[in-house]
Image (cartoon, rainbow, N blue to C red):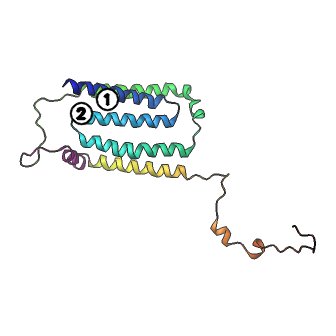
Amino acid sequence: MIVQAIMFYVFAALAVASGVLVVSSRNPVHSVLFLIAAFFNAAGLFVLIGAEFLAMILVIVYVGAVAVLFLFVVMMLDIDFAQLRSGFVRYFPIGALVGFILLAELVLVIGSWVVAPGVPSPAAAGGVPLTNTRALGDILYTRYLFAFQAAGLILLVAMIGAIVLTLRRRADVRRQSISAQLARTRAQSVEVVKVPVGSGSR
């Protein structure tokens, strides 16, 4: 129990520190790296409570896909972060109000959360204890089916939005137009020049 308590405080402290560095880092690439560190520490917390499946899903999906995709999108968009940070003071009251509301909601949720000591562990038909994977699947695809499908739809829209943002038109890039090339006539493509004898370039 002492080792588990020590590991919990270590993972929790590192996760909180990584979350603070995600928000406070000036470089977006560093923010993504700290976000990956926060995901790893959260996965360690899941392992401590016996949810190994959630820990592996967190590492594989979020670290291996979402965080890397976010890093690529930030690098491809080439956003002027100095210009974005220029309005920090102007929008700070609104951000502080939103943060206060979220903090109040978290306090209300944590304050009203009670674990009943007499609740038995979930079991399948026949009295066999459920594994983490099966229990999670039963909850997602029965009680929270519509919320699960809505989350998938939101991720799909976010992916399409990222693709649309990266496929923007740039004026300084020369692009090939197949239709314009096929529509060219002989007069537009070939120019016959008569060079006098002895005056050509050598």
Question: Mark 1–mark 2 contact, CB under 8 Å?
Answer: yes
Q: Nearer the viewer, residue 107 or 74?
A: 74
Q: CA distance from mark 1 to mark 2?
A: 10 Å
Magenta residues span: 126-144
Horizontal side, residue 54 vs residue 78: left or right: left
Q: Secondary structure at mark 1?
A: helix
Q: Which mark is residue 115?
A: none
- Displayed quadrant of residue 64: top left
Marks 1 and 2, the one that precedes in the sequence: 1
Mark 2, residue position: 48
Q: Residue at x 35, y 50 (%)?
A: 152
Horizontal side, residue 190 vs residue 12: left or right: right
Q: Position of residue 145 (x, y in %)?
A: 26, 49
The rendered magenta stretch, by its main secondary structure, is classed as: helix
Q: Secondary structure at mark 2?
A: helix
Mark 1, residue position: 11
